[in-house]
Image (cartoon, coloured by chain):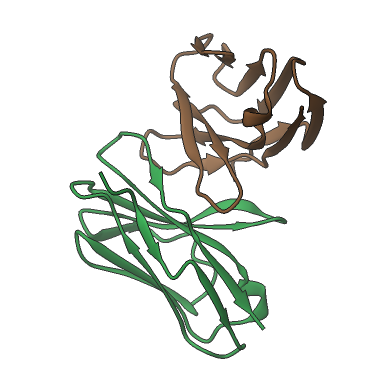
Chain colours: A brown, B green
Amino acid sequence: TQLLEQSPQFLSIQEGENLTVYCNSSSVFSSLQWYRQEPGEGPVLLVTVVTGGEVKKLKRLTFQFGDARKDSSLHITAAQPGDTGLYLCAGDPGGFQKLVFGTGTRLLVSP
Amino acid sequence: DAGVIQSPRHEVTEMGQEVTLRCKPISGHDYLFWYRQTMMRGLELLIYFNNNVPIDDSGMPEDRFSAKMPNASFSTLKIQPSEPRDSAVYFCASSLSSGPQHFGDGTRLSIL
């Protein structure tokens, strides 16, 4: 069974702070996705990374895929209350859409 | 464009009753996925379909769970008989080929 462990599980910070969320596995993934989920809603895709070492930026969010395609990180610069939510990484081991989701990181950004 | 539509949004029923969850995928999408989300186990894939055909149901927990996709615009997930441990949020998602999965807003199921 392929597992994706995220850390930290919970993060409570003040507006303007920077943070990094990690997603680690012992398995290799053909691609890795990051989602944000808000209460009462389904996860919404933020980014997909497919190449080892790849870095993608989405405004204040920076995503990195590890060289060995086993891990990933999400860095948020100058966090805002609107960034509050549950962040999920999801790996696709075989390119067949059968995603394995991480354990999740719950982020709270206070004004 | 309408997203993935799930119904009902909330369901409360007693143990032993049959529960049917419904999903309408995004028009034109050829993959449909059913997930379950709990605090303990996170988001788990139960089953997925391609062109209305079940491809992988290895995540379905027990024979009490069944899923169907009679046509490209409708799918159901049934639990019969339901048990309290089935309480969770159930999500449906759809995608076009190898594209990103789009999730519905889920059905929050409580079995008393």
Q: Please provide percent x and percent y for residue A93.
A: 47, 34
Residue placed at 51% from the left, 11% from the top? A57
Q: Please provide percent x and percent y for residue B100.
A: 36, 35
Residue B70: which quarter of the image? bottom left
Q: Please provide percent x and percent y for residue A26.
A: 65, 30
Q: Is residue A97 above or below residue B55?
A: above
Residue placed at 81% from the left, 32% from the top? A12
Residue placed at 69% from the left, 24% from the top? A22
Q: Nearer the viewer, residue B76 or A93?
A: B76
Outermost residue on the front side: it is: A111
Q: Is residue B6 above or below residue A32?
A: below
Q: Nearer the viewer, residue B96 or A43?
A: A43
Q: Nearer the viewer, residue B88 or B68?
A: B88
Q: Is residue A33 left or right of residue A96?
A: right
Q: Is residue B1 left or right of residue A38?
A: left
Q: Is residue A43 left or right of residue B27?
A: right
Residue placed at 50% from the left, 80% from the top? B64
Say if residue A16 shows up in the picture. Answer: yes
Q: Is residue B63 above or below residue B22?
A: below
Q: Please provide percent x and percent y for residue A92.
A: 46, 34
Say if residue A26 shows up in the picture. Answer: no
On-image quarter of the C terminus of chain A: top right
Residue A2: which quarter of the image? top right
Q: Nearer the viewer, residue A106 or A109?
A: A109
Q: Is residue B86 left or right of residue B103?
A: right
Instruction: State the count of labels.
Output: 0
